[in-house]
Every structure is written in C-alpha cells, then in structure tokens.
Image (cartoon, coloured by chain):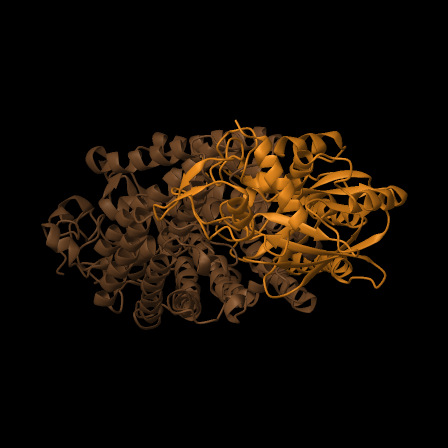
Amino acid sequence: MLSALTSLAAQQGRSFWMPTQGSTFAPEVDGVFQFIFWLSVFFFVIIIGLMTVFVIRYRRRPGIEADNSITHNTKLEVFWTVVPSLLVLVIFYLGFRGYIRARTVPGDTYQINVLGKKWVWSFTYPNGFSTNELHVPLGRPVSLTMTSDDVIHSLWIPAFRIKMDVVPGRYSKLWFVATEKGEFPILCTEYCGTGHSDMLTKVVVHEPSDFMKWMDEAGNQYEGMNPAEAGEKVFKKYGCFACHTLDGKDHPIGPTLKGLWGKMETLSDGKKVLVDENYIRESILDPQAKIVKGRTPSMTVFKGMIKDEEITFLIELIKSLKD
Amino acid sequence: MTSIPVPGESARPVATDAGERNYLTAGRGLASWLFTVDHKRIAILYMIGICSTFMLGGIFAMLVRIEHWSPGATITDSGETYNRWFTLHGAIMTFLVLVPSIPAILGNFALPLMLGAKDVAFPRLNLLSFYLWLIGAVGFVCVLFLGGIDTGWTFYTPYSTTTATKVGLAGLGAFILGFSSILTGVNFLVTIHKMRHPGMGWFKMPLFLWSLYATAIIQIVATPVVGITLLLLVVERTMGLGIFDPALGGDPVLFQHFFWFYSHPVVYVMILPGMGIISELISIYSRKHIFGYSFIAWSSIAIALFGFLVWGHHLFVSTQSAVMSTIFSLLTFSVSIPSAIKVFNWLATMYRGSIRLTTPMIYALSFLFLFGIGGLTGLFLGTLSVDMHLHDTYFIVAHFHYTMMGSTLIALIGGIHHWWPKMFGRMYNEAVGRLAAVLTFVGFNATFIPQFLMGSRGMPRRYYNYPLEFEFLHRASTVGSFILALGLFMAAYNLIASLFHGKKVPDNPCGGASLEWQTTSPPHLHNFEKPPVLTDPYDMEDLYWDEETGGYRSRSVEGASGGS
C-alpha cells in the first residue's frame, strides 16, 4: 500500500516544497506559500547578514571601544514596528481569502459522505454504494460530509491542499474541484492510535464520462468473480489490510488470514474456539466478543457497514487461504 | 561589613577568600541541600532535576529518530510502542523541562541577585515549588514504568478518555507540576514588586527580570485552566461524566479550546525568559548598552498579553467556525510584531559594539538564527489557507522545535554558561564550550530543516510508518539528531569538568553591569556582604578590565566605597 502511494507521488511532477497541484485551491495556496517564503527569506537574509557583518566588523580589538552613545532611536523603532505590522496584515488577508473559499461549500456539489473509523475510511456515494478509496469526477465540485465513529480523525489530501478534522458527534465539510486526473494519497492527520499511520487511502480522479462508467461497474462489483476473488476485493474495500495480511506474515495488530481456517484458537478467558463460518462472521460484526489470547480488542466494528454477501465472500477467501 | 581600605585594592576582598562563606560551602551534608531555602541552592537542585529529565526526554527523542531510519519496523515493530515514545518525549520535555527550565534554574539563581535582594519573597514556598516539581517528575517516571501513555502530550479527547494507557496518572502529574509553576510565578511577581534595590525603578531593572515578570503573569493566569481541564479529563475517565466524549454527551473540541487556552500562552512561558537571557548576553558580549530598552521591556508584556488571545490558531481545521478562525488568525499575527521588535533591537545593540565570540555569545547568535527561522515559519502557520495544508504535518513539528528547543533551550544553555562562573566560581574550558555550541547549532539545523520539507511535501506528524519517498529526509534528520546529542553531551561534560579542573574566577569575569556581578563568585550565603551599589544594568562604560584579577571592575562601586 505504502509503496503504491510512493510510486504514485513519484510519477507526478511537483515543486520543491509542495506536492502535485491537483485541485483549484492548490495554485492559490502555493502562491501564498511562495509569497511568505520569499518575504521570510528577505528578512532572514537581512537579519543574519547584518548579524554576520557586525560580528566581523565590530569584533573585539585592542584599543577600540564600543560606541555606547547609541541607546535608542524612536524613529527607527517605530519604523520596524509599523512595517512588519503592515506586511503581516497583507499575509493575513491572503490567507483569509483562500480559507473562506475553501470553507464555503457551493450549492451544486456532488455529495459524498465520509466515515472515519480506526483505521479505515469509508466513502458513500449518492446511490448508497460505498468504497474504501475516494472516486471523484474531474472538474466538478465535490463536497465531503464527514463524521467519525470513534475518536477524532482528520482527512488530508495533500495534492488538493485541503484538510479538515473528522469529529465524532458532528459533521464537518470539505469541498474541492479536482483539476488533475490520476491517483493522489489521502492521509489521516489527527493522531488516532496504533494504526494512525496506516489510515491511508487514495483519491482517484476520473474523467467525468469514466466516472459514470466506474460507478456503473462498481454497482455490480463482484460480477464474474469466483467467491474467493470477490472476497479479496472485499478485503481491500474495507481496508482490512491495515491490520491483517494474506501472505502468512504476522501483523502487530491482527492475525494473518492465511492458515486461519479450521484452526483451534485459545481465547483470553482460556476457552477454545474453532475458526469456522460462525466464528468469522461474529469476529467481523462484533470483534470484541471473542478475543484471542495475546491480542488486544482493537478491531473496527463492521456491524452495519458490511453486507451479508460480502461476509460470505470473505469466508470463502479465508477458506481458500488454508495451508 | 567593615571594610578596611587597602591602597591600590578595592574595598571588597577578592573572590578567593570568600570561599569559606559562600552559599555552596555554608552548609554541609545532604540535608543542608534537601531542606535549603536559599534560592541559589534551590536553583541548583532544579538544575540537576531538570537536566536529568531533559536526558530522559532526549532518550525518547533519539528512539523516535532511530525508529524513522526506515519506514515500518526499524527498532520496534509496534506502532503502540512508537506512540508511547513520542508521547513521553513530548510530555516530559514540555511539562518537566521547558515550562520550568529558565525561570526555575536561572530565574531562581539570578532574580534576587539582580534585584540586590537577599532571597525571593517566599523562600519556603520556593522549596515547596521544587518538591511539587519533583513529585510531578516521579509521577511521570511511574507512568513510564506502568506502561506509558499513548495520547500525545496534547491529551486530545475522546482518544485520551478511551485509551487504556495511564492517562489519569500522567494528568495528575501535570496537575501537580502546574502548582509548582504557579507558585514560582507568584514568588517572582511579589519579589519583583517588593524587593527591588532601593532606588531601582521598574525601568532600571535588567531586561531578564522584565521577561520573568511577564512570564509570571502567564504562569499565574493560564496554569489553573489546564489544571482544571486535566482534572475534568480524569473525572470523565474515572466516573464517566460526559464533558468531552460525545458518546457521553460531551464536546471533544471543547477540550481543545481549554487545552490551548493554557498551552499556547505556555509557549511564551518558555520563550520569554529565553528572550530575556538573550537581551543580557548580546549587550554584555558586545560591550554595548542595550538598544531600545523600553521597547524590549514593553514587548515582553505585549507578548504575555497577546499570547492569551491566539489559542484558536491551533484549531483552524478542528471544525471551529470560519469566523472564529479568522479572528484568531488576525490576533496571531499581532503577536509576531513584539518578537520582531526584539530581534531588530538585538541587532542594533550589536551595531558599533566590541563583540567577542565567547561561548554564551555563540549561543546568543544561534538563538537569533534559530528564533528567526522559528518565528518566520510561524507566519506560514498563522496564515489560514496555508495552515489548512500544513496543519499536523512535520512542518509544524519543525516550527515548534525551532521555537521551543532551538530558542528556549539554546537560551537556557547559553545562560547557564554565562552565569556558571557566578554559580560555582569556576570557568569552563572556552574552546570546548565553543565547539559544543557550534555542534549543537549544526546538529539542530540538520535535524529540523529536513522536517520542514517533509511536512509541506506531505508527511503527517505522529506517524510510526511513512511513505518511502521520505526516507532520505528522515535519515538526514536522524543523522542531525546524533550531532545535536553529541553537542549537548559535550557542553554538559565541559561544565561538569570545570567544577573539578576549572580556573577560579573573580567577581566579574564576563563584564556584566547588573548587580549580581558585584558580589563574590560564588555569591555569599546572603548574596551580598555589603549592600550593592545601584548602577545602570547596561552601562558598560562603568566597567573596566582589570588585568591583575582577570575580571572587570566597576568605577561607581569603587567610587562609592572610596567615599564612605
């Protein structure tokens, strides 16, 4: 997943300080960034330049005393109080303009609901279909209405230069117009625990016509697949890879699914349980009900998020991964 | 107190024979230190304590840096372990090191001396402050051994109310530390009001005292808020009272407002005393009267007051309303002005000076450089639209390390070097001191400049794992942190070695014009054997170099004792 995101970022052209410009906000934010940057460079060079000149020119030499006649100069001090004050007002205004634009959602947006959960994102489209990756059309205003099921998360799309916290018990909003086709990383930027740095996904920007096609195909997403293949798709869709592997490598948070089928597990209360259809179903819908010895109860509760059909596919996937 | 005038000699005996009665030798045994009410000894207790916790916090910093040598598992394969490391690093450095640091060590040592006073106003309260700090520190060490905490030093709800780690104990520790901070503030405030040398008006005080005064105001007004907030957090955790957790009917963003109402002003508790030290160092080592005394003095007060009105800039993307964010952004820029004034005044002080690159002066110049970067990068973050991109990334991590570590701690280390001969009567090795200062400076920049770049390019903070594209910058940062650690250890070694091998120093080896340089090095148990003579703290022309003792002497002090 990480390496996939990496190669994505590497493909796109970008500036020294900033990632690819992928939305209408990006050029404006970058412009303000550049303005502050060069202004800062200007003042920094003056300050450090003068400091260096003074240290060399006025270094202590025998017989030369410091000139102690200068103790203040009101005109000069008023000057260097007023000039920075005016400059920061300009900076404030530039930031204010862009921020208000980013927080004022226009009326005619394509609306997507976002749910943050430890440690997966779920995006629900107007037709009720949901994905783990965000798919949006190019050039059309899209708004995200976001909430969290547990702790505070924060959704950041660096290429779009937007970020907003995703808070339980309230809805927050973001909007954007994507200007660049392709795939860009989405990251969680509010610390949310063990899997915080793996709460990653991507936004896929389609041509508007491709977006419609994608939506149609995604509607019957499991067509033509055998159950185990469909299970692998479900596994990706719900971000199960954040805590589980399919290749037998142990993950620090959750067990690998390879070789899990038919295993006899010891629970934290000492009881034993056979990994069968019912146990897997319960572990997905109510993961805290039975905790395997040595594991912590940290899995996302998928009750209400996943369809019965999809659970069946997952069970078939686990069966297929029997040693 | 009777002085026998000796021809060709100042009235006061030279430093060396004061050794019998100085504060270090006035009482012997452990008890004489543990139950001391002498502000100078309490300063040294704090110095030992704070340096120990600084080392502990530093170990966690190094663990974090080493872990980032490569993405995924480097020295731990568990995000949970990593989360404990960065939390303990932040919590220890903030609550145990940075907040008390300069006031507790150098403020305690120098404040009464600079005022010409015998001690602080409430010496027993001062000792109580130290023990409260110690209890808080022990609390944090207990947290460490009981499995640590994983909330980040900011304790954001509802994560902090739902995690299984030791948040309650850490919260109580921080609560107790708050009292230590408040009591120090009260003590300094009263001491400055009531115990100035007769004739020392407010605008005759050294600027370090102005900065400590401004700091005391913040400590007294802001600290109770975080105390109550952490208590509410503990109440919610233990009794299930719904204050912050939306599942119980609370408001998680309310916690952020409460928390930053304290925690933003508190960054000025860290930086203001540092600025005060720099005002002293630049003037003394440039042999120049400070430029624009009253602008610097008032800018400290302005920072303390404006600092209370900007907390909302931590919440630009927290779902705080756009109107509030706008107001907080505007107010945030107001606080940059007094800081800019100080920087320009320090530069003007160096103009036509007679500058010597002593170890403290190198730290002071480092401060100008690092605070320059720290301050200017603050402009990016105060700017609403740009902050939307940079918030909670490595850019912000780099920014606050430049202000809190690059500025506050560099000022502290510079100040310790400056007052060290006064504290212990011995001089450290100047060459080693300079080398350590340069290494610290180089290491610091190497550590944190790559972090700015990572942040704006897309690296969020508090990430155990990271995309491979950031590996090079992370490695550069880690290499820098080792250079930084080397510089710090070298400085510590140099200071400690001076206690055993350092050359003895006269009363005023570095040429300060404030009152503490009129007493012996180390000072007498009661600070001054005879009442100090009030002088302008920045009148460098009053001092002249005396080859015989290897120190500076004051014409007005000699004039006063010659006349009596």
Position of B257 with respect to B439 (left or right) is: right
Position of B54 with respect to B122 (left or right) is: right
Total labels: the figure holds: 0
- Residue A35 is situated, as x and y percent measured from the top left of the image, at 73, 47
Residue B530 location, quadrant: bottom left
Instruction: Say which quadrant the N terminus of chain B sits in.
Output: bottom left
Residue B503 location, quadrant: top left
Closest to the observer, B475 or B413: B475
Residue A250 appears in the picture as rendered: yes
Residue A22 appears in the picture as rendered: no
Position of B380 with respect to B136 (left or right) is: right
- Residue A2 is situated, as x and y percent measured from the top left of the image, at 62, 34
Closest to the observer, A68 or B290: B290
- Residue furthest to the right: A209
- Residue furthest to the top: A323
Closest to the observer, B309 or B243: B243
Instruction: Say which quadrant the C terminus of chain B sits in.
Output: bottom left
Rendered view: B135 above or below A252: below
Which chain has been coloured brown in this picture? B
Residue sitting at 48 percent across and 32 percent down? Answer: A250
Position of B295 with respect to B427 (left or right) is: right
Residue B455 location, quadrant: top right
- Residue B141 is situated, as x and y percent measured from the top left of the image, at 29, 49
- Residue B73 is situated, as x and y percent measured from the top left of the image, at 48, 32
Residue sitting at 27 percent across and 53 percent down? Answer: B138
Which chain has been coloured orange in this picture? A
Closest to the observer, A233 or B220: A233
